[in-house]
Amino acid sequence: QVQLVESGGDLVQTGGSLRLSCTVSGSIFSIKAMAWHRQAAGKQRELVAGLAEGSSPNYADSAKGRFTISRDNAKNTVYLQMDNLKPEDTAVYYCNLLVHAHTGLSSKWGQGTQVTVSS
């Protein structure tokens, strides 16, 4: 019954910023790991940013220095701050969380949110 709800995708001009949100619906104990993936038209889904418990965040080369993954534990929400957006960032963005709930550990995916960057 635990689900992820994404929001924040929009149409933005080159150089603009967006903050994507991924909120857990349902009761959980904790988020053990989190990641953001994206899938552009005609391409495979790729990892953009990830953060596992006890480790440092990692980013795709194309996102380093521009994207930041974070979370607000009180709100059970994960964020992806995207700055200096480029047309090649255009894609559907999906959050992926490893959550600890009463049923144990499970991987959950958000429904996706569209980010479009115009030149």
Image: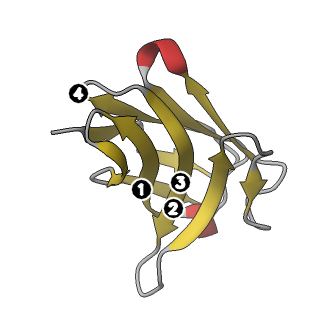
Classify mark 3: residues with Cα within 10 Å, few (<14), some (14-19) or many (20+): many
Residue that mark 4 sits on? 26
**Distance between mark 2 and mark 3 Cα atoms:** 4 Å
- Identify residue type, mark 1: Tyr
State the SS at label 2.
strand
Q: Is residue 57 above or below residue 86?
A: above
Q: Earlier in the sequence, mark 2 or mark 4?
A: 4
- Identify residue type, mark 3: Trp
**Distance between mark 1 and mark 3 Cα atoms:** 6 Å
Query: Is the residue under label 3 in contact with that under label 2 (CB below 8 Å)?
Result: yes
Q: Is residue 29 above or below residue 107?
A: above
Please indicate whether residue 59 sits to the left or right of residue 113 in the image.
Answer: right
**Distance between mark 3 and mark 4 Cα atoms:** 20 Å
Residue that mark 2 sits on? 37
Residue at 41% in and 56% down: 94
Residue at 25% in and 41% down: 103
**Distance between mark 2 and mark 4 Cα atoms:** 22 Å
Residue that mark 3 sits on? 36
**Distance between mark 1 and mark 2 Cα atoms:** 5 Å
Please indicate whether residue 92 sits to the left or right of residue 2 in the image.
Answer: right
Residue that mark 1 sits on? 94
Q: Which mark is residue 106?
A: none
x and y percent of residue 4 in the render? 30, 41
Classify mark 2: residues with Cα within 10 Å, few (<14), some (14-19) or many (20+): some
**Residue lying farthest top?**
74
State the SS at label 3.
strand
**Distance between mark 4 and mark 1 Cα atoms:** 18 Å
x and y percent of residue 82 in the render? 64, 43
